[in-house]
Image (cartoon, grey):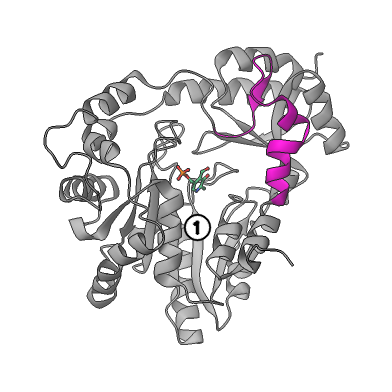
Amino acid sequence: MTVVSQRAIAAERAFEAIKHFAFHSRYGERRGDADIADFTFGNPQEMPLAGLVAAIREGAVPHDKNWFAYKTSEEAPQAFLADVLSRELDLRFEPPDIALTAGAFAAISVAFRLLLDAGDEVVFSEPGWFCYEPMLLVANAVPRKVPLAKPRFDLDLDAIDAAIGPRTRLVIVNTPHNPTGRIYGRDALAALADRLERASRRIGRRIFLLSDEPYRRLRFDGRGFLSPAAVYPWTLIAYSYGKVLLAPGQRLGYLAISPLMPAEDRQALRDAMFATQMAIGWCFPNAVMQNALPQIDELSIDTQALTRRRDALSEALAKAGHAALPPEGTFYLWVKWASGDPEQQWNAFADRGIFVMPGSVMNAPDYFRISLTASDEMVARALPVFAGAT
Ligand SMILES: Cc1ncc(COP(=O)(O)O)c(C=O)c1O
């Protein structure tokens, strides 16, 4: 008999492939070595933004005795974010709509605990972020995965509709999308909203939407962004500063309620927010990050550098027959392996110290993901290998 709960065991199983890749594969053996070119996870491969260091330093100097006291969703950052989000998303957020969290991870977890009872079903698309499933399982919810529609990995509305049953409570949409880089446009989101409205009536229960948008500010070629919160009133937004700052170890994000939500539901969620955040382990951002928010909000990694790397890598990969889907957002490149055995091709890269994330860990074995957060030096080293020249 194991001492571990059934929920923890289920979550561990759901996370097994990615855990194995990260720690026990050929990549796991070499991760951290200075001589590899690491294109796997969205981790920084260069020094942090100077502006972030200055903001954290300043936020750490106490001005009063409460500087490091317990912090919940503090009034000043809530008001600041309501204002920023209202302008950014063209919606009228009010401060109580915003729950400050320790990144998107915590925002998503809070959303699950706010909305889901044991056995409730949650629909999301794959390939997708590999943490939704274990997070749902520890929340005692039931994941229902549906495929995205190839070749452009659009939302498959028929598949989503077909996965909705009497226990469905939530649908998750991630835009810009990890790993494909797709940004879903107004037509797709409006059609999804229409399906969710009709499905809610069909099952006699309100289906909520979780819009997971941590890459929202990382977009290519001047593309716009429409939050699902502007299209479907029963939407909660999860956001993190970890991506735009490329500093995921400094946890800061929020869960925001769509201002379009009918007043009674909006108020009920506002009222339950604090207790839920407290009860799942005080998942508020720490004092320093809350203090530094106004300075932090102005910062971003260099999206021009991401664009340069995207273009150079796509061109090189194409020479060897690997087809990259041009990403519209995020800092990833989603690539279809050239014909042949994906594992053999992954190993051929690894033999030369070049590591990419195999799509097999996301149930998409014909693809791989490249993180554009690799340094220019890593990119230069990898280009001839990706082009099949060595
Ligand atoms: C789609 C998606 N959602 C949420 C997260 C979690 O972000 P954070 O670690 O900044 O909370 C990630 C991180 O990789 C992600 O890719």
Work out whether residue 214 can be spotted.
yes
323 horizontally vs 56: left or right = right
Identified at 61% across, 20% down, the residue is: 312
Quick check: 266 above or below 65?
below
For this rendering, which residue is in front, 50 or 3? 3
Which quadrant of the view contains residue 316? top right
- The x, y position of residue 243, in whole percent, is 44, 36
Residue 76 on the magenta span = no
46 horizontally vs 34: left or right = left
Work out whether residue 225 can be spotted.
no
Identify the secondary structure beneath mark 1: strand
Circle 1: is it few (<14), some (14-19), or many (20+) Cα within 10 Å? many
Span of residues in magenta: 16-42
- The x, y position of residue 192, in whole percent, is 49, 66
Which quadrant of the view contains residue 209? bottom left
For this rendering, which residue is in front, 227 or 292? 292
Residue type marked 1: Val
Identified at 20% across, 50% down, the residue is: 74
- The x, y position of residue 233, in whole percent, is 34, 68
Quick check: 320 above or below 206?
above
- In what quadrant of the picture does the N terminus appear? bottom right
For the view shown, which residue lies furthest in the left direction?
64
- The x, y position of residue 154, in whole percent, is 59, 54
- The residue wearing badge 1 is 173
Residue 19 on the magenta span = yes
For this rendering, which residue is in front, 336 or 151? 336
